[in-house]
Image (tube, rainbow, N blue to C red):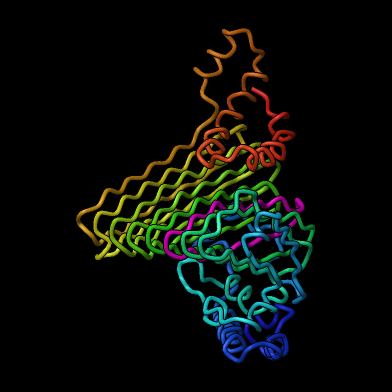
Amino acid sequence: MTESTATAPISRDLVARIGASGPEEVLEARLAAFDAFESMPFPTESSVGWRRTDLAGIDLKPAPPAESVCDIGLPESAKAAGAIASSLEDAIRKTSLPVVSTVRTGLSFRKFSALAQSAWQGGGYLHVPAGADIADPIQISWKGGPYPRLVVVIGKNARATVVEQHDQSAKYLSGRVDLILEDGARLNYIHVQDCARESVIFSHQRAEIGRDAKLVTLNFGLGGRLARTDVEVELQGSGAESDMLGLVFAEGEQQFDYHTLQGHRAPNTRSDLLFKSALDDRSHSAYTGVIIIDRGAQRSDAYQANRNLLLSEGARADTEPMLEIEADDVRCTHGATVGPVDEEQLFYAESRGLEPDVAARMIVEGFFGEVFEKFGQPSVTKLLQGKVAPHVARVGA
C-alpha cells in the first residue's frame, strides 16, 4: 500500500464513480490526475519546495470528496451582455472544455494539485462572450466543499472583473482555478483567501493569455494555518500582458507560501509582479518566483518584486527569485526585500506629531496601499482594505 492510499480517504474507484456521469474524456483526465497523485509522495520538511515550511502539528491528510458549490452573482450588466454562469459539471455536459478534459501540468502540478483535478465535484463556470464590456464586478463566493474548481473564459475583446472569495471553515481545501483569456480580452481578477485560522489551504491558479489580451490578478491572503498558493500565467499570444499582485497579512503562527510563474511563450509580451507580505508575531511567509522566457519570445519585458515587512522579532520571510531566459532580446529584472518598519519613516511620522503606534500603522497601511493602487478599481479593493483593517489596527511600533 502506498503512503497516499494509506492516508487519503479517496481511491481510484471512487474517482471513477465521481466522474461516471460526465463525458468520457473528462473521466479519463480525472483518472490520469489521480494516478499522478498516487505516484507522488506526501511532502515532508525535507521535500523540494517544502524545506522552509514547519509541518509540526499540521495535518495534510486530504478531505473526503464532496460537492463544491459556489454562488456566481451576475450583475444585470453581465446578464444583458450574455454572460453565462453555471456549475462546472453542467457546463461540461453542454460544451467542450479542453481545460477540464486534460490534466493541467506545469510547475504547480504537485500532489495536491493532481488531487484537486481528480476529485472535484460541482464546481463553477463563467463565460463572458466576445465583445462584452462588463463594468460591474462579478462576485463568486464558495459555500462549501473541499475541492472547489472554477473555470473562467473571457471571449475575444471582452472585458470583465471577477472577485472570487473563499471564507470556508473546513480544515482542508485544495482548489483549482483556470482563467482563459481569448485574443484582445481584458480581465481583472481578485482571489480572496480568508478561511478559518486552522485551515490547511492549497490554491492552484493557471491563466492562459491570448494575443493582445491583458490579465491583472490580485491574490489576497489573510486566513488559514498553512496556505500554499501557486499562480501560473502563460503569455501565449504576441502582445499578451500580465500584472500579478499579491498581498498577505499574517499573524500568530500562520504560514503563507506563494509560488509564481511568469511564462513568456510568445514575442512582445510583458509581465509585472509585485507580491507583498506584512508579518506579525511568529508568522512566516515564503515566496518563490520564476520567470521563464522561451527562445521564441523575443522582445519580452518581465519584472518581479517581492517585499516583506517584519512587524515583530519572531516573524520570518524567505524569498527566492529565479530566471530562465533563452531569448537574447529581452528585458528582465527582479528584486526582493525583507526588513522591519523603517526607522527613518517612523521618526519622520513622529516628528509630525503622531504617536509611535499610530505612525507604525500608517506605514503598514501605506505598504499595502501601493498594491491596491496598482490594481485600481477602488470600489473593489475597498472590500480588502476593510478586511485587513482590524489586523493592522493591532500593529504597534
Query: Could you say where residue 44 lies in the image, as x and y percent from the top left?
Result: 58, 66
Task: Give the extent of the magenta segment.
Answer: 178-204
Point 63% across, 66% down: residue: 126
**Depth check, front residue: 211 or 28:** 211
Q: Quadrant of residue 59?
A: bottom right
Residue 186 is a magenta residue: yes
Point 71% across, 76% down: residue: 121
**Depth check, front residue: 24 or 341:** 24
Residue 152 is a magenta residue: no
Task: Name the quarter where the N terminus is drawn.
Answer: bottom right
Q: Is residue 54 above or below residue 347?
A: below
**Depth check, front residue: 121 or 57:** 121
Point 78% across, 62% down: residue: 143
Task: Name the quarter where the C terminus is drawn.
Answer: top right
Marks counted in the figure total 0
Query: Could you say where residue 201 lies in the image, as x and y percent from the top left?
Result: 67, 60
* Relative horizontal placement of residue 48, taking residue 313 as reference (left or right): left
Query: Could you say where residue 32 lies in the image, as x and y percent from the top left?
Result: 55, 86
* Relative horizontal placement of residue 81, taking residue 272 as reference (left or right): right
Q: Quadrant of residue 362?
A: top right
**Depth check, front residue: 292 or 265:** 265
Q: Is residue 72 above or below residue 358?
A: below
* Relative horizontal placement of residue 345, taking residue 120 as reference (left or right): left
Point 48% across, 37% down: residue: 338
Query: Could you say where residue 292 lies in the image, as x and y percent from the top left?
Result: 35, 60
Q: Is residue 367 above or below residue 380?
A: above
* Relative horizontal placement of residue 388, taking residue 100 as reference (left or right): right
